[in-house]
Amino acid sequence: MPIYTHTVDQKVYAFDGLKDLLAKASPARSGDYLAGVAAADYEERVAAQMALAEVPLAQFLSEALIPYETDEVTRLIIDRHDRQAFQAVAHLTVGDFRNWLLSDLATEAALARLAPGLTPEMAAAVSKIMRVQDLILPLCSRFLVVASVGPPTCPCPRRSGKSRKPSNAWPGRLSTRLQPNHPTDDPAGVSASVVDGLMYGSGDAVIGINPATDNVGAVMTLIQMLDAIIQRYAIPTQSCVLTHVTTSIEAINRGAPLDLVFQSVAGTEAANRSFGINLAVLREGQEAALSLRRGTVGNNVMYFETGQGSALSANAHHGVDQQTCEARAYAVAREFSPFLVNTVVGFIGPEYLYDGKQIIRAGLEDHFCGKLLGVPMGCDVCYTNHAEADQNDMDMLLTLLGVAGINFVMGIPGSDDVMLNYQTTSFHDALYVRKVLGARPAPEFEAWLERAGIFSGDGRLLADTTPGPFLDSIRKLGA
């Protein structure tokens, strides 16, 4: 295994292979210290970053961080690598690649062609030598990353020919996931949160519920209720109940009107095993959803969530730093042409991302690496109550991600999830970032908001909007 070195004031820093080099080059975060892989101090971290900048990108194709023979995610990364696409940057080092990404050569079209030729390790490596503005600039205009959804409007045979929104990513647009969670999955409580979010223009990416239980019957009740609301009011969106993929498969087998199959994924085979999944199970879920032929989002029927620290929390990181493990999760995601991928950046806790500064950096890294690899990235801008973070930190991350071109963020009543017990972004927060950046909801959803009398014709929320009979009808649906 190669030894990588860099000298600082006659002191030679040596790093035992790419795994060690990548870990030591990572910006400081509590999870890497917990795993015992972080740099000892700032000087060693800078030495590692300098050494990493000199590594040829091609080296990542010959030096696997986790053995090919023992990890199906590694096999997926290597077997799916597009060598022809890689040729555009094959001659570059990591440092040269950073310079290329910050140049005018890195157009949206060039990045789209390049994505299949990049491995997650390459993306993680270049992100480690970037400052915040570097993570924002290259991909801030790369929106149309969902490739197989068809034209701007598509007929939906299960919706009597009504148009549905085919993508969550458009220039000048910022979508939201309306997250109407309830601690007991009470339909009336969920319905109240749904109408609250709709009245603030939330829900164009998806109306997605984290259920309090994985019981198939309870999950089906929520799926059917959301579908009834969407159909009755012809809302151009899709629904998802974020249950385990196997529960979604069973719900489909029982006739549930499911739009998106959800699953949390990670960047190693062992970490995914801790979630009760492997690539074959994910493929089964994808095939089950496609079999419904609902026409809602074309062939993009998967919704994945990730988060730095998930592999370490399962003792399944193989000595790889948490940010590189996270980037590997995007290779899993892109294998299944997802409609949504969401890094729940601060949810796992301060053991992995200690404070606001670490959460902000991680959120920008995740968005950068995901978009670079060709994945439609959103972010749950969030923290747990025992982290050294507050809502001001989340305002900073939300604003930075908005500038960076994030596809979607969360929308939750009062920014406080009463079921999952963590702090995230509210309906008002989404309105803020749309207004300050001049962004608007997805086109079809915006048109529906205008027809419903919620938004004005110039994308603004009407000040005198009241729920009225709309709310009464939705309450009856949940009764």
Image (spheres, rainbow, N blue to C red):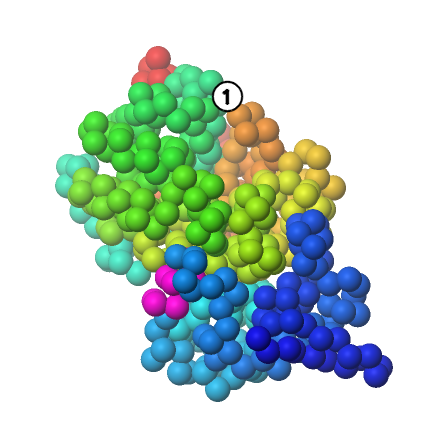
Which residues, given as a range, are shown in magenta?
73-80
Q: Residue 78 magenta-drawn?
A: yes
Q: Position of residue 217 (x, y in %)?
A: 31, 21
What residue do we see at 34% from left, 67% from top? Answer: 80
Residue drawn at 68 percent across, 65 percent down: 24
Q: Main secondary structure of the magenta part?
A: helix
Q: How many marks?
A: 1
Answer left or right for 477 relative to 465: left
Residue at left offset 28%, top offset 42% = 285
Residue assigned mark 1: 183
Q: Position of residue 326 (x, y in %)?
A: 52, 55
Q: Residues within 10 Å of mark 1 (few under 14, many from 20)?
A: some
Q: Relative to the observer, which residue lies in front, 151 or 214?
A: 214
Q: Name above or below for residue 247 compared with residue 165.
A: above
Amino acid under disc 1: Pro
**Any magenta on residue 296?**
no
Figure quadrant of residue 12? bottom right
Q: Residue furthest right?
A: 9
Residue 223 vs residue 439, the one in the foreground: 223
Q: Residue furthest top?
A: 479
Q: Nearer the viewer, residue 225 or 388?
A: 388
Residue at figure coordinates x 32%, y 46% from the top left: 282
Residue 443 vertical placement versus 211 (above, below): below
Instruction: Pick the residue in front: 67 or 97.
Output: 67
Decide if residue 131 is on the left or right side of residue 76.
right
Residue 116 position, x and y percent, is 37, 69
The part of the image, by quadrant, that contains residue 335 is bottom left
Evaluate whether residue 173 shows in this view: no
Q: Is residue 216 left or right of residue 430?
A: left
With respect to residue 98, does 463 lie above or below?
A: above
Quadrant holding the C terminus: top left
Instruction: State whether residue 476 appears in this view.
Output: yes
